[in-house]
Amino acid sequence: MKDYYKILGVTRDTSQEDIKKAFRKLARETHPDANPDDSQAESRFREIAEAYEILSDPQRRAAYDRGEQFGAGDLFSNFGGLDDILQQFFGAGFGGFGGFGGARRRGPARGRDIGVSVDLTLAEAATGVSKTFEVTAPERCPTCSGSGAEPGHDPRRCSTCNGAGQVQVARQTMLGQMMTVTECTTCRGRGEIIDNPCASCSGSGQIDSRRSLNVEIPPGVDDGTRLRLSGRGAVGERGAPPGDLYVQVQMVTDENFTRIGNDLHHKVQLGVAEAALGKKVSVPLVDGSTMEVDIPAGTQSATVFRLNKQGMPRLQRRGRGDLLIEAEVVVPSDLSAEAEEVLREYAELMGEEPAEPKRRLRRRRKR
Protein backbone atom coordinates (compact mmCIF):
# COMPACT_ATOMS: atom_id res chain seq x y z
CA MET A 1 0.00 0.00 0.00
CA LYS A 2 1.29 3.47 -0.88
CA ASP A 3 2.57 5.64 1.95
CA TYR A 4 0.61 8.81 1.28
CA TYR A 5 2.17 10.60 4.24
CA LYS A 6 5.64 10.01 2.82
CA ILE A 7 4.51 11.13 -0.65
CA LEU A 8 3.38 14.49 0.74
CA GLY A 9 6.37 14.70 3.08
CA VAL A 10 4.27 14.83 6.25
CA THR A 11 3.78 12.62 9.32
CA ARG A 12 0.72 10.77 10.58
CA ASP A 13 -0.01 13.43 13.20
CA THR A 14 0.17 16.33 10.71
CA SER A 15 -2.87 18.62 10.83
CA GLN A 16 -5.30 19.03 7.95
CA GLU A 17 -4.11 22.59 7.39
CA ASP A 18 -0.47 21.50 7.13
CA ILE A 19 -1.44 18.74 4.69
CA LYS A 20 -3.04 21.39 2.53
CA LYS A 21 0.10 23.54 2.71
CA ALA A 22 2.30 20.57 1.78
CA PHE A 23 0.18 19.80 -1.27
CA ARG A 24 0.16 23.44 -2.38
CA LYS A 25 3.97 23.53 -2.26
CA LEU A 26 4.44 20.22 -4.08
CA ALA A 27 1.81 21.11 -6.69
CA ARG A 28 3.80 24.19 -7.70
CA GLU A 29 7.05 22.25 -7.86
CA THR A 30 5.90 19.09 -9.63
CA HIS A 31 3.18 20.21 -12.02
CA PRO A 32 4.05 18.79 -15.49
CA ASP A 33 3.72 22.21 -17.10
CA ALA A 34 6.52 23.39 -14.81
CA ASN A 35 8.65 20.36 -15.78
CA PRO A 36 8.20 20.01 -19.56
CA ASP A 37 11.39 17.95 -19.99
CA ASP A 38 10.53 15.41 -17.30
CA SER A 39 8.64 12.40 -18.72
CA GLN A 40 7.79 11.19 -15.20
CA ALA A 41 6.32 14.50 -14.06
CA GLU A 42 2.71 13.62 -14.83
CA SER A 43 2.74 10.28 -12.99
CA ARG A 44 4.53 11.88 -10.02
CA PHE A 45 1.99 14.68 -9.89
CA ARG A 46 -0.89 12.18 -10.06
CA GLU A 47 0.56 10.38 -7.04
CA ILE A 48 0.78 13.63 -5.07
CA ALA A 49 -2.80 14.54 -5.99
CA GLU A 50 -3.95 11.04 -5.02
CA ALA A 51 -2.29 11.37 -1.63
CA TYR A 52 -3.95 14.73 -1.05
CA GLU A 53 -7.37 13.42 -2.09
CA ILE A 54 -7.15 10.71 0.59
CA LEU A 55 -5.52 12.63 3.43
CA SER A 56 -7.50 15.86 3.00
CA ASP A 57 -10.77 14.06 3.81
CA PRO A 58 -11.00 13.13 7.53
CA GLN A 59 -13.15 10.05 6.89
CA ARG A 60 -10.94 8.72 4.10
CA ARG A 61 -7.85 9.53 6.12
CA ALA A 62 -9.20 7.53 9.07
CA ALA A 63 -10.05 4.62 6.76
CA TYR A 64 -6.55 4.76 5.25
CA ASP A 65 -5.01 4.75 8.73
CA ARG A 66 -7.01 1.59 9.47
CA GLY A 67 -5.42 -0.10 6.45
CA GLU A 68 -8.26 0.26 3.95
CA GLN A 69 -7.32 0.64 0.28
CA PHE A 70 -8.93 2.87 -2.34
CA GLY A 71 -9.56 2.10 -5.99
CA ALA A 72 -9.42 4.52 -8.89
CA GLY A 73 -13.18 4.96 -8.78
CA ASP A 74 -12.98 6.24 -5.21
CA LEU A 75 -10.62 9.08 -6.04
CA PHE A 76 -11.52 12.67 -6.93
CA SER A 77 -15.23 11.97 -6.23
CA ASN A 78 -15.42 15.13 -4.14
CA PHE A 79 -14.27 17.21 -7.12
CA GLY A 80 -15.15 17.45 -10.78
CA GLY A 81 -11.62 16.30 -11.59
CA LEU A 82 -8.05 17.13 -10.69
CA ASP A 83 -8.24 20.49 -12.42
CA ASP A 84 -10.96 21.48 -9.94
CA ILE A 85 -8.54 20.79 -7.10
CA LEU A 86 -5.90 22.93 -8.81
CA GLN A 87 -8.34 25.75 -9.43
CA GLN A 88 -9.43 25.59 -5.81
CA PHE A 89 -5.83 26.27 -4.76
CA PHE A 90 -4.45 28.42 -7.57
CA GLY A 91 -7.42 29.78 -9.54
CA ALA A 92 -8.51 29.19 -13.12
CA GLY A 93 -5.14 30.20 -14.57
CA PHE A 94 -3.48 27.05 -13.28
CA GLY A 95 -4.33 25.01 -16.32
CA GLY A 96 -5.08 21.39 -16.99
CA PHE A 97 -2.92 18.94 -18.86
CA GLY A 98 -2.81 15.43 -20.24
CA GLY A 99 -5.56 13.29 -18.73
CA PHE A 100 -6.51 15.78 -16.04
CA GLY A 101 -9.30 17.37 -17.99
CA GLY A 102 -8.91 21.06 -18.71
CA ALA A 103 -11.78 22.57 -20.67
CA ARG A 104 -14.18 19.95 -21.88
CA ARG A 105 -15.96 20.05 -25.16
CA ARG A 106 -19.48 21.06 -24.29
CA GLY A 107 -21.19 19.47 -27.25
CA PRO A 108 -24.96 19.02 -27.48
CA ALA A 109 -26.63 19.38 -24.08
CA ARG A 110 -28.41 16.51 -22.39
CA GLY A 111 -32.18 16.83 -22.27
CA ARG A 112 -33.71 18.42 -19.20
CA ASP A 113 -35.44 16.41 -16.52
CA ILE A 114 -39.22 16.48 -16.20
CA GLY A 115 -41.10 16.31 -12.90
CA VAL A 116 -44.73 15.29 -12.44
CA SER A 117 -46.81 14.50 -9.37
CA VAL A 118 -49.43 11.81 -8.96
CA ASP A 119 -52.20 11.45 -6.38
CA LEU A 120 -52.63 7.87 -5.20
CA THR A 121 -55.16 6.20 -2.96
CA LEU A 122 -53.93 3.76 -0.36
CA ALA A 123 -55.43 0.88 -2.35
CA GLU A 124 -53.51 1.96 -5.47
CA ALA A 125 -50.27 2.21 -3.51
CA ALA A 126 -50.88 -1.27 -2.10
CA THR A 127 -51.29 -2.99 -5.45
CA GLY A 128 -49.35 -0.75 -7.81
CA VAL A 129 -51.04 1.09 -10.63
CA SER A 130 -50.46 2.36 -14.16
CA LYS A 131 -50.83 6.13 -14.55
CA THR A 132 -50.87 8.25 -17.70
CA PHE A 133 -49.60 11.85 -17.68
CA GLU A 134 -49.81 14.64 -20.22
CA VAL A 135 -46.55 16.62 -20.35
CA THR A 136 -45.22 19.38 -22.57
CA ALA A 137 -41.51 18.93 -23.28
CA PRO A 138 -38.98 19.31 -26.12
CA GLU A 139 -39.10 16.57 -28.74
CA ARG A 140 -36.75 15.90 -31.63
CA CYS A 141 -37.63 18.18 -34.53
CA PRO A 142 -39.26 16.05 -37.26
CA THR A 143 -38.18 18.45 -40.02
CA CYS A 144 -34.41 18.19 -39.45
CA SER A 145 -34.45 14.93 -37.44
CA GLY A 146 -32.78 16.78 -34.58
CA SER A 147 -29.71 17.98 -36.53
CA GLY A 148 -30.69 21.63 -36.30
CA ALA A 149 -29.85 22.20 -39.98
CA GLU A 150 -32.32 22.83 -42.77
CA PRO A 151 -32.85 19.61 -44.79
CA GLY A 152 -30.18 19.40 -47.50
CA HIS A 153 -27.74 21.54 -45.53
CA ASP A 154 -25.48 19.64 -43.13
CA PRO A 155 -23.61 21.32 -40.27
CA ARG A 156 -19.98 22.06 -41.08
CA ARG A 157 -16.91 21.45 -38.96
CA CYS A 158 -15.71 24.49 -37.01
CA SER A 159 -12.54 25.77 -38.67
CA THR A 160 -11.30 27.45 -35.49
CA CYS A 161 -11.06 24.29 -33.39
CA ASN A 162 -11.18 21.78 -36.29
CA GLY A 163 -14.20 20.12 -34.72
CA ALA A 164 -12.63 19.58 -31.30
CA GLY A 165 -14.83 22.14 -29.54
CA GLN A 166 -11.83 23.45 -27.62
CA VAL A 167 -8.63 25.35 -28.33
CA GLN A 168 -5.26 25.82 -26.61
CA VAL A 169 -4.53 29.25 -25.19
CA ALA A 170 -1.22 30.55 -23.77
CA ARG A 171 -1.61 31.99 -20.26
CA GLN A 172 0.83 33.64 -17.88
CA THR A 173 0.83 31.95 -14.47
CA MET A 174 3.05 31.90 -11.43
CA LEU A 175 5.03 29.16 -13.17
CA GLY A 176 5.50 31.18 -16.32
CA GLN A 177 3.70 30.76 -19.63
CA MET A 178 1.45 27.68 -19.80
CA MET A 179 -0.78 26.26 -22.48
CA THR A 180 -4.31 25.74 -21.23
CA VAL A 181 -7.34 24.32 -22.98
CA THR A 182 -10.51 26.39 -23.23
CA GLU A 183 -13.86 26.18 -24.99
CA CYS A 184 -13.92 27.34 -28.59
CA THR A 185 -15.77 30.66 -28.76
CA THR A 186 -16.60 30.28 -32.46
CA CYS A 187 -18.74 27.17 -32.10
CA ARG A 188 -19.31 27.50 -28.32
CA GLY A 189 -17.78 24.11 -27.71
CA ARG A 190 -19.94 22.18 -30.15
CA GLY A 191 -17.29 21.52 -32.78
CA GLU A 192 -19.63 22.38 -35.65
CA ILE A 193 -21.44 25.36 -37.09
CA ILE A 194 -24.91 25.48 -38.65
CA ASP A 195 -25.01 27.96 -41.52
CA ASN A 196 -28.59 27.14 -42.54
CA PRO A 197 -30.68 26.62 -39.39
CA CYS A 198 -33.84 24.56 -39.62
CA ALA A 199 -36.85 26.87 -40.03
CA SER A 200 -39.06 24.68 -37.82
CA CYS A 201 -36.81 24.63 -34.74
CA SER A 202 -34.53 27.64 -35.41
CA GLY A 203 -31.48 25.38 -35.34
CA SER A 204 -32.07 23.89 -31.88
CA GLY A 205 -33.08 20.48 -33.20
CA GLN A 206 -36.08 20.50 -30.83
CA ILE A 207 -39.67 21.59 -30.75
CA ASP A 208 -42.05 21.66 -27.80
CA SER A 209 -44.64 18.93 -28.01
CA ARG A 210 -47.38 17.63 -25.73
CA ARG A 211 -47.24 13.90 -25.23
CA SER A 212 -48.68 11.17 -23.05
CA LEU A 213 -46.47 9.21 -20.69
CA ASN A 214 -47.53 5.93 -19.17
CA VAL A 215 -45.83 5.15 -15.87
CA GLU A 216 -46.02 1.97 -13.83
CA ILE A 217 -46.16 2.82 -10.12
CA PRO A 218 -44.77 -0.12 -8.09
CA PRO A 219 -46.56 -1.46 -4.99
CA GLY A 220 -45.49 -0.02 -1.66
CA VAL A 221 -44.85 3.62 -2.57
CA ASP A 222 -45.56 6.17 0.14
CA ASP A 223 -46.24 9.87 0.36
CA GLY A 224 -43.14 11.70 -0.87
CA THR A 225 -41.73 8.72 -2.78
CA ARG A 226 -39.81 10.00 -5.83
CA LEU A 227 -39.49 7.62 -8.75
CA ARG A 228 -36.81 8.19 -11.40
CA LEU A 229 -37.37 6.88 -14.92
CA SER A 230 -34.15 7.19 -16.89
CA GLY A 231 -34.41 8.55 -20.42
CA ARG A 232 -38.11 9.43 -20.17
CA GLY A 233 -37.57 13.18 -19.91
CA ALA A 234 -37.02 15.83 -22.58
CA VAL A 235 -35.00 14.93 -25.67
CA GLY A 236 -31.38 16.09 -25.77
CA GLU A 237 -29.84 18.51 -28.24
CA ARG A 238 -28.82 17.03 -31.61
CA GLY A 239 -28.28 13.43 -30.59
CA ALA A 240 -27.48 14.03 -26.92
CA PRO A 241 -29.19 11.68 -24.44
CA PRO A 242 -32.62 12.59 -23.09
CA GLY A 243 -33.27 13.71 -19.53
CA ASP A 244 -35.06 11.74 -16.87
CA LEU A 245 -38.64 11.70 -15.65
CA TYR A 246 -39.25 12.12 -11.91
CA VAL A 247 -42.63 11.10 -10.48
CA GLN A 248 -43.50 12.51 -7.05
CA VAL A 249 -46.11 10.49 -5.15
CA GLN A 250 -48.77 12.27 -3.08
CA MET A 251 -51.02 10.06 -0.98
CA VAL A 252 -54.72 10.82 -0.62
CA THR A 253 -56.06 10.69 2.95
CA ASP A 254 -57.80 7.38 3.67
CA GLU A 255 -60.90 7.27 5.86
CA ASN A 256 -60.17 3.80 7.25
CA PHE A 257 -56.43 3.69 7.78
CA THR A 258 -53.50 5.70 9.05
CA ARG A 259 -50.21 4.59 7.55
CA ILE A 260 -47.02 4.50 9.58
CA GLY A 261 -44.20 3.04 7.52
CA ASN A 262 -45.49 -0.24 6.13
CA ASP A 263 -48.01 -0.75 8.94
CA LEU A 264 -51.64 0.34 8.78
CA HIS A 265 -53.61 1.53 11.82
CA HIS A 266 -57.39 1.20 12.11
CA LYS A 267 -59.59 2.22 15.05
CA VAL A 268 -62.59 0.19 16.18
CA GLN A 269 -65.12 1.92 18.42
CA LEU A 270 -66.70 -0.19 21.16
CA GLY A 271 -69.46 0.59 23.60
CA VAL A 272 -68.84 0.01 27.29
CA ALA A 273 -70.87 -3.22 27.27
CA GLU A 274 -69.16 -4.44 24.07
CA ALA A 275 -65.73 -3.85 25.58
CA ALA A 276 -66.75 -5.61 28.79
CA LEU A 277 -68.50 -8.58 27.17
CA GLY A 278 -66.55 -8.90 23.91
CA LYS A 279 -67.69 -8.54 20.33
CA LYS A 280 -67.07 -9.83 16.82
CA VAL A 281 -66.25 -6.90 14.51
CA SER A 282 -65.80 -6.63 10.74
CA VAL A 283 -62.47 -4.93 9.95
CA PRO A 284 -61.74 -3.42 6.50
CA LEU A 285 -58.60 -4.48 4.65
CA VAL A 286 -56.57 -2.34 2.25
CA ASP A 287 -57.63 -4.42 -0.76
CA GLY A 288 -61.30 -3.56 -0.17
CA SER A 289 -62.31 -6.83 1.50
CA THR A 290 -63.11 -7.33 5.20
CA MET A 291 -62.06 -9.71 7.96
CA GLU A 292 -63.96 -10.83 11.05
CA VAL A 293 -62.03 -10.21 14.26
CA ASP A 294 -62.99 -11.32 17.77
CA ILE A 295 -62.60 -8.60 20.39
CA PRO A 296 -62.23 -10.45 23.71
CA ALA A 297 -64.24 -9.61 26.82
CA GLY A 298 -62.61 -7.08 29.11
CA THR A 299 -60.84 -5.16 26.35
CA GLN A 300 -59.51 -1.82 27.55
CA SER A 301 -59.45 1.36 25.51
CA ALA A 302 -56.23 1.79 23.44
CA THR A 303 -55.64 -1.99 23.35
CA VAL A 304 -54.02 -2.88 20.02
CA PHE A 305 -54.55 -6.13 18.12
CA ARG A 306 -52.15 -7.07 15.33
CA LEU A 307 -53.08 -8.80 12.07
CA ASN A 308 -49.83 -10.01 10.54
CA LYS A 309 -49.04 -9.23 6.90
CA GLN A 310 -52.23 -7.26 6.31
CA GLY A 311 -50.44 -3.92 5.92
CA MET A 312 -48.63 -2.35 2.96
CA PRO A 313 -46.14 -4.19 0.75
CA ARG A 314 -42.51 -3.20 1.19
CA LEU A 315 -41.30 -1.14 -1.76
CA GLN A 316 -39.05 -3.27 -3.99
CA ARG A 317 -38.69 -5.85 -1.22
CA ARG A 318 -40.50 -8.97 -0.12
CA GLY A 319 -43.05 -9.02 2.66
CA ARG A 320 -45.71 -6.71 4.01
CA GLY A 321 -46.36 -4.67 7.10
CA ASP A 322 -49.10 -5.44 9.62
CA LEU A 323 -52.59 -4.12 10.30
CA LEU A 324 -52.89 -2.75 13.83
CA ILE A 325 -56.43 -2.56 15.23
CA GLU A 326 -56.85 -0.17 18.14
CA ALA A 327 -59.87 -0.50 20.41
CA GLU A 328 -61.51 2.78 21.37
CA VAL A 329 -64.05 2.42 24.16
CA VAL A 330 -66.70 5.13 23.79
CA VAL A 331 -68.37 6.29 27.01
CA PRO A 332 -71.89 7.61 26.40
CA SER A 333 -72.28 11.30 27.21
CA ASP A 334 -76.09 11.56 27.00
CA LEU A 335 -77.93 8.76 28.81
CA SER A 336 -81.66 8.22 28.79
CA ALA A 337 -83.38 7.88 32.15
CA GLU A 338 -83.71 4.13 31.65
CA ALA A 339 -80.03 3.72 30.68
CA GLU A 340 -78.91 5.81 33.66
CA GLU A 341 -80.99 3.69 36.04
CA VAL A 342 -79.49 0.47 34.70
CA LEU A 343 -76.00 1.89 34.89
CA ARG A 344 -76.47 2.97 38.49
CA GLU A 345 -77.66 -0.52 39.37
CA TYR A 346 -74.48 -1.87 37.77
CA ALA A 347 -72.35 0.58 39.74
CA GLU A 348 -74.01 -0.54 42.98
CA LEU A 349 -73.27 -4.18 42.15
CA MET A 350 -69.61 -3.37 41.46
CA GLY A 351 -69.23 -1.22 44.56
CA GLU A 352 -68.66 1.93 42.55
CA GLU A 353 -69.70 5.35 43.79
CA PRO A 354 -70.76 7.55 40.85
CA ALA A 355 -71.85 11.15 41.35
CA GLU A 356 -75.41 11.75 42.51
CA PRO A 357 -77.91 12.59 39.76
CA LYS A 358 -78.20 16.32 39.13
CA ARG A 359 -81.48 17.98 40.17
CA ARG A 360 -83.48 19.00 37.17
CA LEU A 361 -84.79 22.58 37.28
CA ARG A 362 -88.47 23.06 36.59
CA ARG A 363 -89.50 25.71 34.09
CA ARG A 364 -91.75 28.48 35.38
CA ARG A 365 -95.04 29.01 33.67
CA LYS A 366 -95.54 32.39 32.06
CA ARG A 367 -98.43 34.36 33.58
Image (spheres, rainbow, N blue to C red):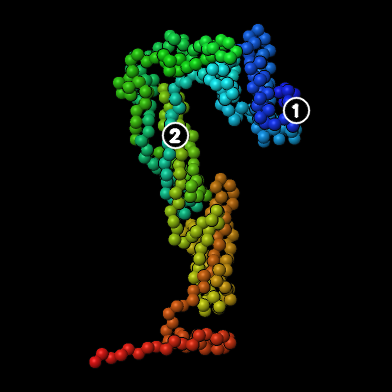
* Mark whose residue sits in front, 2 or 1: 1
Instruction: Check disc 1 and report the residue beneath it.
Output: 11
C-alpha gap between disc 2 and disc 1: 47 Å
Q: Does residue 242 appear in this view? A: yes
Residue at x 45% of width, y 27% of height? 110
Instruction: Check disc 2 and report the residue beneath it.
Output: 113
Left or right side of 29 for 104: left
Q: Earlier in the sequence, mark 2 or mark 1?
A: 1
- The amino acid type found where label 2 is placed reads Asp
Q: Report x, y in % for residue 113.
A: 44, 34
- The amino acid type found where label 1 is placed reads Thr
Residue 328 vs 10, above or below: the answer is below
- Of 256 and 308, nearer the camera is 256
Residue 321 vs 201, above or below: the answer is below
Residue at x 55% of width, y 71% of height? 301
Residue at x 72% of width, y 30% of height? 14
Residue at x 44% of width, y 49% of height? 250
